Image (tube, rainbow, N blue to C red):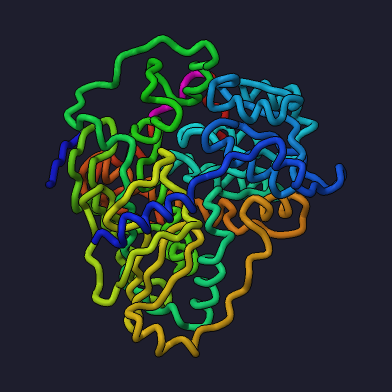
Amino acid sequence: MNSKNNSRRSFLKQAMLLSAAATAPRILTAADFKNIKKAGPNERVNLACIGIGNRGGEILREFHKTGLANFVAFCDVDMGGPQTLENLKLFPDVPRFQDFRVMFDKMGNQIDAVSVGVPDFSHFPITMAALALGKHVYTEKPMARTFNEVELMMKAAKKYHKQVTQMGNQGHSEGNYFQFKAWKDAGIIKDVTAITAHMNSPRRWHSWDPNIKSFPPAEPVPSTLDWNIWQTTTQGHSYNKDFVNGQWRCWYDFGMGALGDWGAHLLDTAHQFLDLGLPYVVDPIKLEGHNNFFYPMSTTLSFKFPKRGKMPPVEVKWYDGLDNLPPIPEGYGVSGLDPNIPPPSTGKLEPVKLNPGKIIYSKELTFKGGSHGSTLSIIPEEKAKEWASKLPEVPVSPSNHYKNYLLACKGEEETRSPFHIAGPLSQVFCLGVLAQWTGDKLEFDREKKIITNNKHANELLLGPPPRKGWEQYYKV
């Protein structure tokens, strides 16, 4: 790898503490479940949950709250680990597995749909196996770790077209989705030329030494964990606590960093409704603390998208890092924290200078917005008042992301983030990660889907060969 090391407050601390309290996730208890109205046995979807701790556990609980899921199997490589115990206590009678392949072999005929809430690098083989077996699939974002894996997942979804697919960018079923579409259709959002996306909260690796020269040393594997299955298609890693339970997000080999974690929550609607597709250039303008193993301390990326029909070219700039704040336009106002935005994956909401969000620049108007389902507003305030009477009515979402998936499995709705929509978005992030990893400006052929100026980066679109015994998932 080439090494590259380039080198308001938004509201009062009290307000931040109040917002933090509003967004703190509440753990459901058995008593809560009594109040959840369930559909009849023949009206529920037989759901298998793969990954039931950490984020996977949160997904499981969200599906339960819909009243439309009948849990038929749980699978987790660390079944019995501390992060899985609460869900196991709440659902003691659901069959348990550590290997998704064994689960499918023994219970495949009882499973209608699956949720995949595991580390980024493991999304691919599990999703491909499920689709090949005729199962509907809900896969957490981003879809996969490599560009080619996302490509194969889209091809599989097209081949097995009767199966429902949904990527887990839950804001895609909330206010921002319906507002953006309505404003775009009404010509409020038009002629967009630039978008800034920013996520400047603390990340797990910010306390690590970027001068790392090797992976961390091997440690004893916990008795509850099947390390061999945890690795799925990857190879050559010995267990270390900094690889599991969310720490995997830090490493190029396993996760997609801040961009893969929050990019979809910030850019999904703009990407879909502005028909951005794939960029032709990805330029790492700033990589502070760059190394060959885990993500930089601060990153600024420039993605350039060409003209699409009558829509002008767009430059999307991504900012992460504690002190790597984007330029703020005049009249921006206060960066309020929407209580509907979940905290970062560390579970901590700490005061930051600028909350996660986006700024959208068009030839006539400028918009600001938060993350997930947060809606946009026109800035400055004077301009917003001028346009207030021209804004269209925005439909109310008929279902959240989880209910939308289950209703789609039942044939009653269509998913809002199927793989043919979520795939190109995920591939944008894959290209961004390659620019972070290599430290190089990448020129990309949108038609041939190759990197034309960097042989090594182009090879990384494919990634290393899968581990022996896992090759089957790369065939569609």
State left or right for residue 306 relative to residue 113. Answer: left
State left or right for residue 442 relative to residue 426. Answer: left
Rendering coords of residue 47 (x, y %): 72, 38
Split into 4 quadrants, where in the image is the N terminus? Answer: top left
Secondary structure that dominates the magenta span:
loop
- Looking at the rendered structure, the number of numbered marks drawn on it comes to 0
Say if 251 sits above or below 162 in the image. Answer: above
> In which image quadrant can residue 281 be found?
bottom left
Rendering coords of residue 295 (x, y %): 28, 38
Residue at x 32%, y 74% (from the top left corner):
361
Residue at x 51%, y 66% (from the top left corner):
176
Residue 257 is covered by the magenta coloring? no
| Visible residue check, residue 476 | no
Nearer-the-camera pick, 383 or 48: 383
Nearer-the-camera pick, 407 or 311: 407
Rendering coords of residue 400 (x, y %): 63, 57
Split into 4 quadrants, where in the image is the C terminus? Answer: top right
Residue 465 is covered by the magenta coloring? yes
Say if 209 sits above or below 114 in the image. Answer: above
Residue at x 33%, y 36% (from the top left corner):
204
| Visible residue check, residue 350 | yes
Residue extending furthest front? 14
Rendering coords of residue 104 (x, y %): 70, 27
> In which image quadrant can residue 302 be found?
bottom left
Residue at x 35%, y 81% (from the top left corner):
381
> In which image quadrant can residue 103 be found?
top right
* Magenta range: 464-468
